[in-house]
Image (spheres, rainbow, N blue to C red):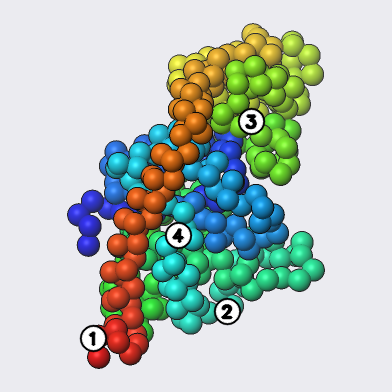
Amino acid sequence: MASTPRVFSGIQPSGELHIGNYLGAVKNWVRLQDGYECIFSIVDLHAITQAYDPSELAQRTRDMAVGLLAAGIDPARSILFVQSHVAEHTELGWILTTVTPLGELERQTAFKEKAQRLESVPAGLLNYPVLQAADVLLYLATLVPVGEDQVQHLELMREIARRWNHRFGAGFFPEPQPQLTTAKRVLGLDGQAKMSKSLGNTIGLLESPEAIWEKLRPAATDPARKTRKDPGNPDICNIFTIHQGFSPPPIQAEVAVKCRTAAWGCLDCKRVLADHMIAELTPIRERAVDLVAKPATVRAALRAGAERARAIARTTMAEVRRRMGFLGAAGD
Ligand code: SF4
């Protein structure tokens, strides 16, 4: 068992990071590296549970790796790898399906939401949380950074660990604990739906200062502020949520007061936000440009990450196979 608590977290290869997944997950990951042994995975095997274009998957995976490295995931301190490069994820995933109750999978809110939009539901969508459990348990990780919407999956993961342990080896898999991220969920620029590339309501992490301002300027605010004289409510304004991710606390306090008293207009408020965003994102963009120019560096980082991940995964799987009685697993 590792002396420093081990964290596992994954992100789908959706291509370039946007400020929603940066503030919701990746910024927290960068901080976690200071206190924990971190394993971060680009979870391409999860991504294929939904319709996707095979000709884009590799590039989206590379782009995500560039974004993560540029944002501050340090491959010298953390393990960063692509999920499909470590075959043990699928092996443990299959094994865990044999102790997972079907009813629990069918009850998962995320599954129900996705399934109702599909005519034919692939079993992979149902088993998605089992693969998530395998991702974490493979590394005997004890902490999983999650948002509120992922708590149900984590509960199921703990249940799967308990069931396997009960059948094959008391206490072998630790029951992972949630590390709830404090970041509020950033909505898209339309202020309606979740920020998502497919909805075209994002600001990319690597966008130029001009592009950031062009997108921020028309973004939705508190609809009560019809004119500059109308006071607003920062608590229901998505722009304020983004301020909370990028602007220092004294600025956030000033924004709230000026909003409630109509001491400034939304455009003034957005300009201050744009300045803080640009200050934080410019060095990230510069690192990304550098990494894109050196694809061999990115490839080498992912290869080394997969090797380190595989070494841990192999040790876990050897023990899993031995405890489950597979021929050859105990040297027989
Ligand atoms: S002043 Fe800022 S926080 Fe208030 S409604 Fe406008 S954009 Fe939102």
> Of label 1 and label 2, which has the lower sequence position?
2
What is the three-letter code of the residue carrying label 1? Gly
Q: Residue at x 30, y 75 (%)?
A: 318
In the rendered structure, the answer to whether residue 86 lies left or right of residue 46 reads left
Residue 92 sits in quarter: bottom left
Q: Which residue is mark 3?
A: 203
Amino acid type of disc 2? Leu
Q: Which of the two residues, 218 or 69, is positioned nearer the viewer here?
A: 69
Residue where numbered disc 1 is placed? 331
User: Where is mark 4, residue-wise?
Assistant: 85
Residue 61 lies, with reference to residue 171, above or below; the image says above
Q: Is residue 21 left or right of residue 323?
A: right
Where, by quadrant of the figure, is residue 207 drawn? top right
The kind of residue tagged 3 is Ile
Quadrant where the C terminus sits is: bottom left
Q: CA distance from mark 2 to mark 4?
A: 28 Å
The kind of secondary structure element at disc 4 is helix
- Mark 4 Cβ and ligand 1 under 8 Å apart: no
Q: List the residue tagged with mark 2.
A: 102
Give the CA separation, mark 1 to mark 4.
26 Å
